[in-house]
Image (tube, rainbow, N blue to C red):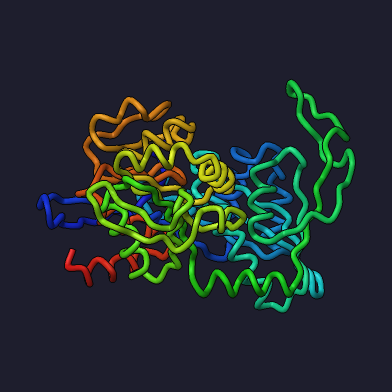
């Protein structure tokens, strides 16, 4: 809980003159080296339910394309003498003629559900496209619903199943032929369209309702757009016209029903009452949140919404979170962090209230576009 590596820096609050922080995952991806083998072997042994073992790992590093995702936080390093111990994930893929096949992707079990697998996958997609691959292939256990959701969100299509292909483990015994392999493919035309869409701009959904907090709603939308994100403001009501908690009149871009079948890079909820209750009671929004949560998409909420929306619908179990004081009893299953304006745990970001709206929005921006973009926007706002 809350063990992810982050890079924090100070931001002066214009309203309360407090030192606030916004958190950007401090990781980077590079090609794996032969010297990474001890770290990757440990990662494979500890975090892969069906480890490859030393021989296969070494062979993969010699014969396939490999990438690792590392933390640059000193707190994650096992020791100063073991620079490779901060490897959090590994992806290995083969390349034959105009095809590239994912052989294995493994993420440290302590930092899963933070979007690291997605980052590695995108690097592989980009590298394969640059090498002229016409088709990407992978197979996955039928029971691995999270991985299947990730692959489908990246454009892979199910093309077949191999019955009784994978071993499964029961009570320490390996039994053959109890689980099917799902075969997925991503072909050139679809691959290029996905990469072009990602390069152009990340997409963020901001659902709004009557009674949402004025400052939070406007700040979220403005900061994210300043940072170059495509922000879709969607009303959960039958009208695009919204009246915020303190009387500000807003007009949404669309109705939520208009974008219900779309996938976004983040969903960000403003708070305020009774706006948070309207968001909570929108079955379509909750369905979208659940679908995005499965894929480790960034889900963010501020003020009353962490408790009223996320807490009510079970998004905070075993997480650390914050919210507007007085709503903390609604953070069901979470550890309440009272003294932080923003708290990030896995793919869930929560913010305290209106005074934290700026740092909350910059945190969302930084997680989607990186530290440099968030810092540039902060500097332009004189934060």
Q: Which residue is drawn at 72% across and 59% down?
A: 156
> Can you give x and y, in whole percent of width and height, for residue 199 in the image?
53, 73
User: For residue 379, which quarter of the picture?
Assistant: bottom left
Q: Considering only vertical position in the picture, is 325 above or below 235? A: above
Is residue 79 at all visible to an observer of this figure? no
Q: Considering only vertical position in the picture, is 126 above or below 142? A: below
> Can you give x and y, in whole percent of width and height, for residue 266 in the image?
47, 55
Q: Which residue is drawn at 41% across and 27% down?
A: 332
Q: Considering only vertical position in the picture, is 172 above or below 275? A: above
> Can you give x and y, in whole percent of width and height, for residue 187 in the image?
76, 69
Is 305 placed left or right of 34 in the picture? left
State the residue in front, 147 or 276: 276
> Can you give x and y, in whole percent of width and height, for residue 357 in the image?
26, 52
Q: Residue at x 52, y 57 (%)?
A: 69
Is 318 placed left or right of 380 in the picture? right
Residue closest to the far top: 171
Residue closest to the far left: 17
State the residue in front, 92 or 322: 322
Quarter of the figure that contains the N terminus:
top left
């Amino acid at each position: 809980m809350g063990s992810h590596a982050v890079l924090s820096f100070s931001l002066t609050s214009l309203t309360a003159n407090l030192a606030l922080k916004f958190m950007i995952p401090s990781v980077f991806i590079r090609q794996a080296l032969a010297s990474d083998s001890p770290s990757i072997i440990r990662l494979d042994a500890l975090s892969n339910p069906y480890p490859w073992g030393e021989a296969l790992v070494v062979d993969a590093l010699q014969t396939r394309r490999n990438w690792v995702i590392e933390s640059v936080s000193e707190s994650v390093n096992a020791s100063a003498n073991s620079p490779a111990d901060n490897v959090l994930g590994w992806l290995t893929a083969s390349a034959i003629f105009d095809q590239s096949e994912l052989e294995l992707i493994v993420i440290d079990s302590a930092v899963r559900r933070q979007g690291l697998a997605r980052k590695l996958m995108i690097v592989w997609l980009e590298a394969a496209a640059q090498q002229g691959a016409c088709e990407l292939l992978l197979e996955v256990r039928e029971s691995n619903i999270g991985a299947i959701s990730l692959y489908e969100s990246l454009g892979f299509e199910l093309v077949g199943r191999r019955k009784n292909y994978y071993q499964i483990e029961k009570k320490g015994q390996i039994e053959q032929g109890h689980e099917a392999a799902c075969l997925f493919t991503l072909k050139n035309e679809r691959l290029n369209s996905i990469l072009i869409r990602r390069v152009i701009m990340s997409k963020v959904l901001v659902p709004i309702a009557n009674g949402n907090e004025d400052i939070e709603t406007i700040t979220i939308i403005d900061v994210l757009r300043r940072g170059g994100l495509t922000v879709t403001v969607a009303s959960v009501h039958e009208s695009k016209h919204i009246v915020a908690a303190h009387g500000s009149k807003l007009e949404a871009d669309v109705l939520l029903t208009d974008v219900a079948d779309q996938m976004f890079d983040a969903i960000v909820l403003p708070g305020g009452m009774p706006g948070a209750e309207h968001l909570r009671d929108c079955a379509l929004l909750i369905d979208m949140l659940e679908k995005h949560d499965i894929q480790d998409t960034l889900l963010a909420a501020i003020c009353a919404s962490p408790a009223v929306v996320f807490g009510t619908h079970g998004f905070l179990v075993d997480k650390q979170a914050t919210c507007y004081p007085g709503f903390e009893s609604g953070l069901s299953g979470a550890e309440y962090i009272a003294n932080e304006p923003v708290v990030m745990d896995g793919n869930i970001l929560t913010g305290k209230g209106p005074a934290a709206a700026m740092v909350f929005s910059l945190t969302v921006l930084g997680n989607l576009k990186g530290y440099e973009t968030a810092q540039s926007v902060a500097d332009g706002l004189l934060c």
